[in-house]
Image (cartoon, rainbow, N blue to C red):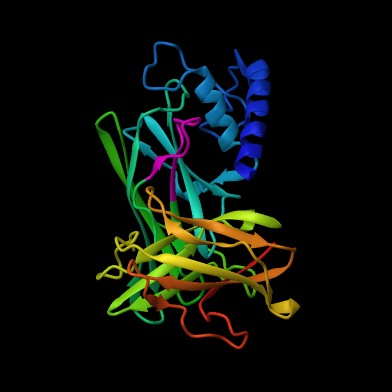
Amino acid sequence: MKRQILHSLIIAISATLLLSACGSSNDDDIIGGGTDITIPGEEDSECCNAEETFLAYAFLNNGFVKEITELRDTIADKYVLKVYSAGGKLHVGYNDLYFALIKISSQGYVRDFDISDITPVMTMTKMGMKHSTPTATEAVIYDKTYPAVRRAWISFLMSSNDGGFWELSYKASSQNQSITHTATVINVDALANGLAWLKSFIVGDNTYYLSLVNPNNFQTGINTIQAYVSKQSADKTKPYLVANETFTIEITPTMPDMGDHSSPNNEPLILQESGIYEGKLNLSMTGLWNIHLVVKDKDGNIVAGADNDTSGYSSLYWTITI
């Protein structure tokens, strides 16, 4: 629902831009982060057409996403690569990242480019060790409506603090030219006290991570709930990729501040073809919710969440608020 509203808003903004931006030659252009937009010439086959350009521009300037400026880079002095997130910030747990490539000569959004080898690494200075975190290592087209926007995600295990710092590197390529963006220090904020959007469980010698996707989008009533299951790499400094194993994740929401009452009509998270897990979550009122998790393997055996907490529900749970 939120995406539909956002899409409608973007269409409206695009129409406004169409009336106001044509013929603009202001030097404060989209590469510099200004409010004017330059329409690429029809002969520039690398760039999006006018409609696609307006949509990309409107999406990336909608007020919800902002650029993470320290991750900006250039390819062969011909293209500028910009990276965006919600509010231009990163936090513990799941984060969407958006990538856009701009051709310097025409100021147009490039249609075809690749982002790969996305690698977040935490250096824990006090402990003298490094580790990565669950992440998508390649960006894909965010939506067919926005062919110039690529999306990836990272789910950070912990925040930046005095005990360590995060760095992020990636590779970008277009038209047989490429760059490697060297590891850049980034800031990762902690979640509000009491919230938990990333949980782990162990099966045999393997550690898995459950990343809850964008719980700040939840509303009262039935919600589509999504999550990724990632597997810790043997080399802990390498990205933790989406697990090859298939699980079923049963969910039970409760309100700890309201006597742990639950709500009905929830559906377990099932693996989708895209690699994401998806189910239905019913939140009957606003407030703090624990989403208790019982993880089963492909044969139906419980592999995590069998132990109960003081409420009598699974001791493995995400904590959110709406």
Q: x and y percent of residue 127 in the render?
A: 38, 82
Identified at 43% across, 26% down, the residue is: 104
Q: For residue 248, what is the image quadrant?
A: bottom left
Is 142 magenta? The answer is: yes
Above or below, comparing residue 14 to residue 114 in the picture: above
Q: x and y percent of residue 234 in the render?
A: 25, 71
Q: For residue 129, what is the image quadrant?
A: bottom left
Identified at 57% across, 57% down, the residue is: 280
Q: x and y percent of residue 321 in the render?
A: 67, 65
Q: x and y percent of residue 44 in the render?
A: 39, 16
Prevalent SS, magenta region = loop
What are the residue bounds of the magenta stretch?
A: 139-152
Is 15 magenta? The answer is: no
Q: Nearer the viewer, residue 247 or 14?
A: 247
Above or below, comparing residue 103 to residue 319 in the picture: above
Residue positioned most to the bottom: 310
**Can residue 186 be seen in this snapshot?**
no
